[in-house]
Image (cartoon, helix red, strand yellow):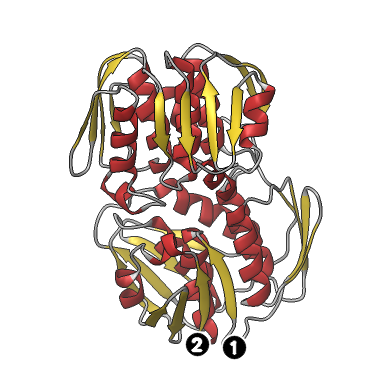
Amino acid sequence: MNCAKITPRFLDGKVNAIPSKSMLHRSIICAALCKNEQSIIKNVVYSEDVKATIDCAKNIVGADIKCFDDYIVVIGGNIKQNPMGYVGESASTLRFFIPISMLKNGAEFKCKDSLMKRPLDKYISCIGANCKSDKDIISINGSLQGGEYKIDGNISSQYISGLLFALPLVDCDSRITLISKLESKPYVDMTIDMLKRFGIDIIEDSLGYLIKGGQHYKNNDIVIEGDWSYGSYFYLANFMGSNIEISGLDSNSLQGDRRITEFLLKDDIDISNTPDLFPTLVVAACAKKGRTRLFNAKRLRYKESDRLHSMAIELAKIGADVEEYDSELIINGKGFLNGGTVDSHNDHRIVMSLAMASCVCKNPVIIKNVDAVKKSAPSFFEVFKNIGGNICEYMGE
């Protein structure tokens, strides 16, 4: 479906969180790097981003991967020379596999248009690669070396995670030195945790990270925990008056987005470590009365869409009072929204947050380009209907 009309109503029922996309990316990569050893990854949902990581694990790392309904069997491979991997719109997949591919002098990555527009220059420069872009192909050439890598911590944690996957496999020791405060640190913590499960040791210190060279990935069987980013939309619905029982989430998770229950109660929120909660919290701010400030959000301008601007203009269309600044939004909540027609900007997180915004609208909400939700949560609208969501689907405009 390309366009959905949602009639306002509160939701009621049970929802089980889908598996963490972040954990799935990391486990598939680690399993693929276990040469000739088998790992089983359980609790899998095949979103578009996860499919992209599976493709690159096969075609760049050379892993043998068999996909079943809810689990994956991975036999680790040997990194290929001059391969091509499909990354689609998955920035995580691209940024993780660039340094891995440089263990054998690089690769070509086939991307969708939205990903081609997202910045890579500082990453490429930092790791000593050559990069060429042509239509939908990004070509990376260069050999990853051990040593020191100085990285801005406020650009993307995915840059650091990518190096953490690859540097243990070079011959000598390496260091990642952070030259500014690390944002989205929980995502790096998740990477280090997954690496540890597969036998890789990373040392964190006051300057950044120390990585011993000459390490080897060791196979492991993994059960993927529930995704707090996905769960946040249903916590939002409950905050606005719905009655949803949410299961499958670990309150002790390393995922930063587990703070959703805390943030829903705040009026001044630093979003730097939990950027994926931003669309959820903007809607929550509209649904209550009073002023809410979401700050340290500049990196959100370089997500699947410019999320600061996208959320500001789309919510304004349905009656929100939103002030947009360089790195923050201020929302003057009225406790309700009017309803009307909005666009997702082909951003999966905006689709889900706007769908939940319908709960506090006086009139129906029509969301354009809702197929974007398949990037992370292909079953979202099926679940939404099962808990009482009233959706009329349209094909085309």
**Mark number, residue 73:** none
- Earlier residue among tags 2 and 1: 1
Task: Give the quadrant of residue 379.
Answer: top right
Between 214 and 349, the residue placed more toward the observer is 349
| Residue 248 visible to the viewer | no
What is the three-letter code of the residue carrying label 1? Answer: Gln
Position in image of residue 155 (x %, y %): 31, 57
For residue 53, side relative to residue 190 (left or right): right
Between 234 and 104, the residue placed more toward the observer is 234
Q: Which residue is mark 2?
A: 105
Label 2 with label 1: CB-CB less than 8 Å: yes
Q: Which residue is mark 1?
A: 81
Q: Where 387 falls versus 294 (above or below)?
A: above
- Secondary structure at badge 2 equals loop
Disc 2: CA contacts within 10 A as few (<14), some (14-19) or many (>=20): some
What is the three-letter code of the residue carrying label 2? Answer: Asn
Task: Give the quadrant of residue 173.
Answer: bottom left
For residue 133, side relative to residue 76 (left or right): left
Q: How many marks?
A: 2
**Distance CA(mark 2)–CA(mark 1):** 7 Å
